[in-house]
Amino acid sequence: MNEERLMTVLLAPHVSEKTATGADKHNQHVFRVIRSAKKSEIKQAVEKLFDVKVAEVNTINMQGKRKMFNRRPGKRPDWKKAVVTLEAGSDIDFGGFS
C-alpha cells in the first residue's frame, strides 16, 4: 500500500461519550476516515500511525444532516466512520482524550 495514501486515510478521532465508553469497555476507537477508504487501508493506517495491533474494523457511511442555512434548506456533507477494535494489550492514547 502506498504510504502517502495511508497517511491521508484517517482524518480525525471521533470523540463523544459513546465512543469513550466503547474505548473503555470494548477496546474500540472511532475515527473519521475518507469516503473511499477500505477496511484493509484503515487497518494498515491505524497499525502504522499508532503502533498497535488491530483485531477488527467496521465502517459506517454517515448521512449528512439536513439543516437550514440562512433561511435556505441545505445539507451537511456525508462522511464515513470507522470503528477499530484493538487486540488485547493494545491501546491508543490521544493525549487526554479516550
Image (cartoon, rainbow, N blue to C red):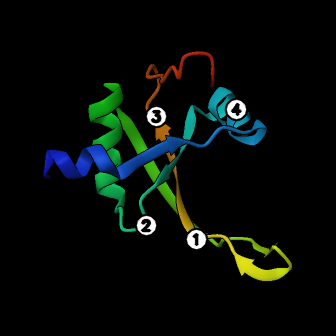
Residue at numbered disc 4: 20
7 is higher (above) or lower (below) than 90? below
Residue at mark 3 to residue at mark 1: CA–CA distance: 26 Å
Distance from Cα at disc 3 to Cα at disc 2: 22 Å
Q: Residue at 31% of width from left, 25% of height from top?
A: 51
Considering only order in the chain, which callout, 4 or 1, is on the residue closer to the N terminus?
4
Please tell me the numbered disc located at residue 56: none
Q: Which sits earlier in the primary sequence, circle 3 or circle 1?
A: 1
Which quadrant of the view contains residue 63?
bottom right
Residue underneath mark 3: 86
The three-letter amino acid code for the residue at tag 1 is Asp
48 left or right of 35? left
Label 3's element? strand
Q: Earlier in the sequence, mark 2 or mark 1?
A: 2
Distance (Cα) linking label 2 and label 4: 23 Å
How far apart are the alpha carbons under marks 4 and 3?
14 Å
Badge 2 crowding class, 10 Å Cα cut-off, few under 14, some 14 to 19, many 20 or more, is some
Secondary element at tag 2: loop
Q: Please name the residue that numbered disc 2 is placed on.
A: 35
Which residue is labeled 1 in the image?
A: 78
Report whether 21 appears left or right of 78. Answer: right
